[in-house]
Amino acid sequence: MDKRIPYKPPPRRQFFKYLVNSIAAAIGVALGVPLLGFFILPAFKRPKLVWKECGPVDGFPKGTVSLAHLKSLEKRYWPEDWGEEAAWVYRDNEGTFVVYNMHCTHVGCPIRWSAPAHRFFCPCHGGVFDENGNVVAGPPPRPLDRYLVKVENGVLYAETAYERRGQAFEVS
Ligand code: FES
């Protein structure tokens, strides 16, 4: 018969072992939770929409393309004309609006609308787009980028922070 007594660590050693493990776990949680939030939460956050005023709806006749100077709705701390932004507004014959980013989808040169030719032209490498933003000629790899649009109280607004690449516009 085995008369050996099983080894039992002294309670003090056990206590310190638990203490050290608990401190390590607390530090892990304290560092891990904010880090997890930092990396995971943005995926669940809805992007903030930044609406800019294009102008009164009546200023854009049906069946035309017009240049709009976008007016920021947020409080600005510098003169209005600093960093002024523009966009091309197409209002079709039914009255539906499309607001285009005015930069070519090739390398980003500003495009110009020619009413007689009924086309957008890019001066840099000969990119050409129709009024629906589709590439007609040249190297641009995709249609013109569009902004989300809305009409409120007779005023047209464009949301410029998150442009839609070739997606259908929405009106709310
Ligand atoms: Fe417009 Fe190259 S930047 S065609």
Image (spheres, grey):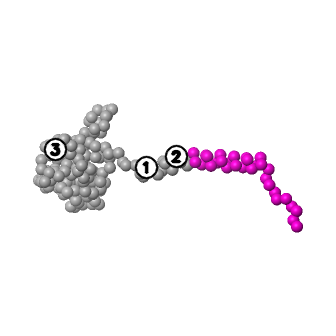
Q: Assess mark 2: CB under 8 A from ligand 1? A: no
Residue kind at label 2, given as amino acid type:
Pro
User: Which dot marks residue 17?
Assistant: none
Secondary structure of the residue carrying tag 1 is helix
Q: Assess mark 1: CB under 8 A from ligand 1? A: no
Residue occupying the point 32% across, 45% down: 49
Whether the magenta-drawn stretch holds residue 9 is answered as: yes
Instruction: Say which label, 1 or 2, has the lower sequence index.
Output: 2
Of the pair 98 and 137, the residue shown nearer to us: 98
Q: Which residues are magenta?
A: 1-30
Image quadrant for the N terminus? bottom right
Residue 108 position in % (x across, y down): 29, 52
82 to 126, vertically: above or below: above
Q: Are marks 1 and 2 in contact (CB under 8 Å)?
A: no
Q: Which residue is mark 2?
A: 34
Residue occupying the point 77% across, 48% down: 11
Can residue 30 be seen here? The reply is: yes
Can residue 105 be seen here? The reply is: no
Q: Which residue is mark 3?
A: 57
Neighbor class of circle 1 (other Cα within 10 Å; few <14, some 14-19, many 20+) is few
Instruction: Say which label, 1 or 3, has the lower sequence index.
Output: 1
Q: Which residue is mark 1?
A: 42
Please give left or right for residue 59 compared with residue 42 in the image: left
Magenta-highlighted stretch: main secondary structure?
helix
Residue 144 position in % (x across, y down): 25, 55
Whether the magenta-drawn stretch holds residue 118 is answered as: no
Residue 8 position in % (x across, y down): 80, 55
Camera-side mark, 2 or 3: 2
